[in-house]
Image (cartoon, rainbow, N blue to C red):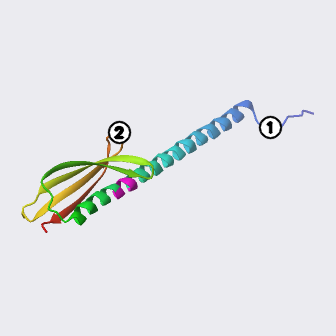
Amino acid sequence: MTCRSRGFTLVEVLVAVAIVAISLAAGLKAAGALTDNAQRLTDVVNAQWCADNALTNLKLGKQFPGVGDTDFECHQLGSDYKGKLVTRPTPNPNFRRVDAVVSDPAGLPLLTLSTVLPRY
């Protein structure tokens, strides 16, 4: 009588370990991407608030803005953002186009928000 042992061979165990390792690596990469996307979303939302605040200040000031660029800074939820208000003329001289460009601290643009302001 021959008695054969039952179980997995070394090759089968190594293949299973390799599959588990590849699956875990892919899961970690996906989790890292989700974390990066969450941070990017936070930065874009904060930049949106900064741009909205800057453009609302112009609207509430009720002064016709001059053509040119103006820098501003914004602090939202513990983060600092740099911004620039870019004011350009329109074909109708009673209106001006204003773009609020908000960048992260490294200077990379996050968001551009535009509006048209009338002469009061």
Q: Position of residue 73 (x, y in %)?
A: 31, 48
Q: Position of residue 82 (x, y in %)?
A: 31, 46
Q: Classify mark 1: residues with Cα within 10 Å, few (<14), some (14-19) or many (20+).
A: few
Q: Quadrant of residue 22?
A: top right
Q: Decide: is 114 above or below 34.
A: below
Quarter of the image where the N terminus is located: top right
Q: Position of residue 86 (x, y in %)?
A: 19, 51
Of residue 8 and residue 75, the one placed in the foreground of this image is: 75
Q: Is residue 65 magenta?
A: no
Residue located beneath label 1 in the image: 7
Q: What residue is at 59 percent from the left and 42 percent from the top?
A: 23
The residue type indicated by label 1 comes to: Gly
Seen from this angle, which residue lies furthest right? 1
Q: Judging from the image, what secondary structure is the residue with disc 2 in?
A: loop
Q: Which residues are magenta?
A: 45-49
- 108 lies left or right of 92: right
Q: Classify mark 2: residues with Cα within 10 Å, few (<14), some (14-19) or many (20+).
A: few
Q: CA distance from mark 1 to mark 2?
A: 57 Å
The residue type indicated by label 2 comes to: Ala
Q: Quadrant of residue 52?
A: bottom left
Of residue 6 and residue 97, the one placed in the foreground of this image is: 97
Q: What residue is at 75 percent from the left and 33 percent from the top?
A: 9
- 88 lies left or right of 9: left
- 69 lies left or right of 39: left
Of residue 16 and residue 5, the one placed in the foreground of this image is: 16
Q: Position of residue 72 (x, y in %)?
A: 28, 49
- 56 lies left or right of 92: right
Q: Quadrant of residue 16?
A: top right
Q: Main secondary structure of the magenta part?
A: helix
Mark nearest the camera among 1 and 2 is 2
Sooner in the amino-acid sequence: mark 1 or mark 2? 1
Residue located beneath label 2 in the image: 106
